[in-house]
Amino acid sequence: MNQRLRMLYSNVAVHATADLEHEAAIELLLLVMIADRHITDDELNEIRRISEESGFETATFSFDQYLGQAMAKVRAAVNDDGTEALLDDIDARITSNVLRQSLFSAARDVAGVDHKIDAAEQTLLAQVAARFA
């Protein structure tokens, strides 16, 4: 009986954790997007593309549904000088090695989509690299 229960519930934590990780990844990419205090449609579309191509879109997670909540959280952190605390929180929520290894590349793609990476974005990218690359 215990084996059957383990099999039945084996994916529950994985799916719950995956959604939390996807939320954290979106928050990180939004943080990169607003680091230079300029938000463009190209950057937002790049984050949406990354979300879709990374398989974040599921029956229980949607980029478009999470966008407002995530943006509010990221803006509050930036406005309250809480970027480091937000990075700590994101870092703690992402446990998947595969996702961790892909985040720096994704962050760099978001920062560079407008063909210009300013000093604030470079500083944030260095922090992301130190944590996730």
Image: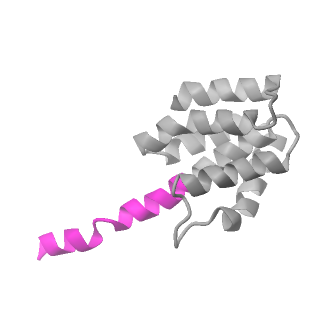
- Can residue 46 be seen at all in this image of the molecule? yes
- Looking at the picture, how far across and down is residue 35, in whole percent? 79, 36
In the image, residue 131 lies at what x, y percent? 54, 30
Q: Which residues are magenta?
A: 1-22
The quadrant in which the N terminus is found is bottom left
Residue 65 point in image, percent of width and height:
68, 68
Using residue 24 as the reference point, say whether residue 119 is left or right of it.
right
Q: Residue 78: image x %, image y %?
A: 79, 41
Looking at the picture, does residue 58 appear above or below residue 93?
Answer: below
Residue at horizontal 85 percent and vertical 45 percent from the top: 39
Tell me if residue 6 is in the magenta stretch. Answer: yes
Q: Residue furthest right?
A: 38
Q: Which residue lies at the image location 53% right of the left edge and 52% below the top edge?
A: 54
Q: Nearer the viewer, residue 97 or 9?
A: 97
Q: Residue at x 61, y 49 (%)?
A: 50
- Image height check: is 71 above or below 89? below
- Tell me: 95 left or right of 125: left
Residue at the far bottom: name it. Answer: 1
Residue 82 visible in the current orientation:
no
Magenta stretch, overall SS: helix
Residue in front for this viewpoint, 86 or 59: 59
Q: 75 and 61: which one is in front?
A: 61
Q: Quadrant of residue 77?
A: top right
Residue sitting at 74 percent across and 35 percent down? 111
